[in-house]
């Protein structure tokens, strides 16, 4: 089985692994890792495939984890693609296909880097582990979060973790994600009384009632952020109300989201929302979903090693940022691990004609290898 990163990436891209389908990607990865001395544990939950694999070194040391996902978003209209999305194709130095950048290219680079490192340092210290799921692009309820819960029950330590999300913006290695904002979603139903528009005195318009409170929420200053996180953001994502032009609506549905810094807490934000709604004397129902808490990896072992690896390989100084959406890193950080995200340029992720620079994948192998060498080589 070839461990050339491009060959590995093509093998993974060619598998139609739309969430939560894995399409044999994990079996392929485990076969390769098994040849390198990894012991596997399949940890499937409901419709989601996951695995946890570990290679123990000859001496005590840290546990280093590569984490990622084999699932991809749907391809969309196939006629809009230049090439079939699940047939990896090389064009002008780029590898095209769904998942090329997010994140099958990174998985291939992890495998290739691990193979090279184990060959060079078979008696490395500590352990190398893989935590792979098929449920990152979907509801993320039976994937990494469940595996981490099980590992924490066992008191399985994780010291360092690289998540292969496409973190780069303009060129490989220009950005490392060393944390993420928290994500909290609110589901609000404002209650009024339905009636005929010609008889407003007999009704109570839920849309009208909601205006001042929603305006106050959008204008609230939630926090100032800090040196690592921007200020907390509140955004209304969905509004629904009304049934006909001659009917005063008795309900209005609003869905909103906080992306919050470490200066705020989920419980604190919830209470402040309730206080604003109550101040405007609304009759309402409110439910919440905590999608993830904020986390931050400081300038220490893993982040320092990652920056050095990128400088050596790409000759640029990586910038550590916490911007963007959420990732499975938020679940792994709960173990106390240092977590960073390092991956390809993200310009085409989730788009038609997703692609990744072939030279970047080869360099990514060297970046991952360098980090392993710095942290685990004897």
Image (cartoon, helix red, strand yellow):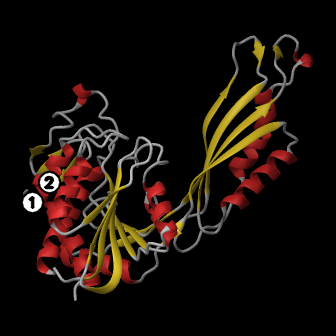
| Cβ atoms under marks 1 and 2 closer than 8 Å | yes
Residue 213 appears in the picture as rendered: yes
User: Which secondary structure, mark 2?
Assistant: helix
Q: Is 66 located above or below residue 305 in the figure? A: above
The residue carrying mark 1 is 4
Q: Dot 1: within a 10 Å radius of its alpha carbon, few (fewer than 14), some, or many (20 or more) residues?
A: some
User: Which secondary structure, mark 1?
Assistant: loop
Given residues 54 and 75, the one toward you in this image is 54
Position of the C terminus, as image quadrant, is bottom left
Residue sitting at x 49%, y 48%: 141
Residue 311 appears in the picture as rendered: no
Residue 371 picture location, percent across and down: 26, 77
Residue 89 picture location, percent across and down: 12, 42
Left/right of residue 5 with respect to residue 127 in the rendered view = left
Given residues 100 and 231, the one toward you in this image is 100
Given residues 153 and 331, the one toward you in this image is 153
Left/right of residue 130 with respect to residue 178 in the rendered view = left
Residue 373 picture location, percent across and down: 22, 81
- In space, the residues marked 1 and 2 are separated at their CA atoms by 6 Å
The residue carrying mark 2 is 8
Left/right of residue 147 with respect to residue 285 in the rendered view = left
Q: State the count of labels.
A: 2
Residue sitting at x 7%, y 58%: 2
Position of the N terminus, as image quadrant, is bottom left
Q: In terms of image quadrants, where is residue 375?
A: bottom left
């Amino acid at each position: 089985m070839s461990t050339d990163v491009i060959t590995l990436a093509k093998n993974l891209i060619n598998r139609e692994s739309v969430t939560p389908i894995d399409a044999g990607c994990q079996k392929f990865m485990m076969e390769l890792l098994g040849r390198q001395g990894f012991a596997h544990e399949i940890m499937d939950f409901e419709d989601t495939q996951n695995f946890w694999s570990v290679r123990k070194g000859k001496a005590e040391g840290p546990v280093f984890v590569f984490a990622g996902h084999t699932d991809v978003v749907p391809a969309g209209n196939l006629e809009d693609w230049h090439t079939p999305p699940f047939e990896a194709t090389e064009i002008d130095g780029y590898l095209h296909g769904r998942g090329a950048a997010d994140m099958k290219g990174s998985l291939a680079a992890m495998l290739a880097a691990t193979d090279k490192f184990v060959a060079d340092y078979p008696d490395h210290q500590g352990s190398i582990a893989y935590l792979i799921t098929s449920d990152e692009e979907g509801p993320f309820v039976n994937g990494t979060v469940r595996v981490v819960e099980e590992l924490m029950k066992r008191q399985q330590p994780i010291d360092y973790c690289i998540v292969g999300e496409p973190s780069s913006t303009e060129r490989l290695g220009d950005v490392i994600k060393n944390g993420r904002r928290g994500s909290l979603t609110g589901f609000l139903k404002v209650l009024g009384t339905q009636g005929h528009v010609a008889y407003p005195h007999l009704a109570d318009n839920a849309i009208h009632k909601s205006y001042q409170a929603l305006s106050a929420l959008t204008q609230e200053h939630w926090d100032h952020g800090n040196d690592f996180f921007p200020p907390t953001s509140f955004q209304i994502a969905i509004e629904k109300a009304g049934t006909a032009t001659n009917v005063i609506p008795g309900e209005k549905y609003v869905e909103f989201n906080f992306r919050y810094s470490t200066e705020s807490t989920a419980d604190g934000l919830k209470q402040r929302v309730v206080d604003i709604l109550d101040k405007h004397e609304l009759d309402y129902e409110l439910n919440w979903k905590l999608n993830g808490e904020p986390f931050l990896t400081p300038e220490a072992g893993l982040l320092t090693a990652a920056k050095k690896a990128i400088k050596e390989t790409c000759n640029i100084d990586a910038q550590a940022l916490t911007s963007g959406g959420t990732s499975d890193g938020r679940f792994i950080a709960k173990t106390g691990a240092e977590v960073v995200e390092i991956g390809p340029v993200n310009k085409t992720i989730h788009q038609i004609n997703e692609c990744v620079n072939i030279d970047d994948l080869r360099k990514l192998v060297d970046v991952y290898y360098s980090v392993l060498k710095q942290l685990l080589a004897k």
